[in-house]
Amino acid sequence: MGLADDAKNKAEDLKGRGKEAAGSVTGDDQLKSEGKGDQASADIKQKATDAADAVKGKIDDVKDKLTGH
């Protein structure tokens, strides 16, 4: 988890936005839908990454308290 995952998720979101925009301009509803799907997928992945990072942070806090750091 971290920066690499954040970058991948952002790239997927941007790709989706591009597809959606291209679909809108060309009137291609399928491409527009694919773009929205890519954006939704990126959003879900980002939320999962954020949750995993939060859990890892809490685990690290507990470890620090137990070890006296």
Image (spheres, grey):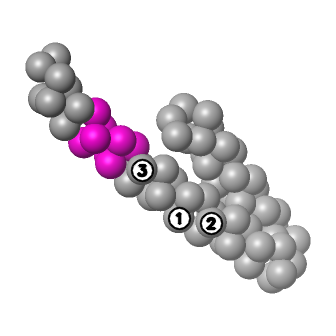
Give the residues drawn in magenta, as a range: 53-60
Q: Position of residue 56 (x, y in %)?
A: 35, 41
Secondary structure state at the residue bearing disc 3: helix
Rate crowding at label 2 as few (under 14), some (14 to 19) or many (20 or more) other CA atoms within 10 Å.
Answer: some
Is the residue under label 2 in contact with that under label 1 (CB below 8 Å)?
A: yes
Earlier in the chain: of badge 2 and badge 3, it is 2
Q: Position of residue 54 (x, y in %)?
A: 32, 46
Q: Position of residue 52 (x, y in %)?
A: 42, 50
Q: Provide the residue designation for mark 1.
A: 44
Q: CA distance from mark 1 to mark 2?
A: 5 Å
Q: Say which amino acid is labelled 3.
A: Ala
Q: Say which amino acid is labelled 2.
A: Ser
Foreground residue, 62 or 39? 62
Residue depth check, mark 1 versus mark 3: number of the one nearer the observer? 3
Question: Who's the residue at 12% across and 19% down the image?
Answer: 68
Q: Provide the residue designation for mark 3.
A: 52
Question: Who's the residue at 45% across and 58% down the image?
Answer: 47
Say left or right for 51 vs 60. right
Is the residue under label 3 in contact with that under label 2 (CB below 8 Å)?
A: no
Q: Say which amino acid is labelled 1.
A: Ile
Residue 54 painted magenta: yes
Say left or right for 5 vs 14. left
What is the number of the mark on residue 41?
Answer: 2
Q: Is residue 19 above or below residue 68?
A: below
Secondary structure state at the residue bearing disc 2: helix
Which image quarter: residue 10? top right
Q: Looking at the image, can residue 64 be seen? A: yes
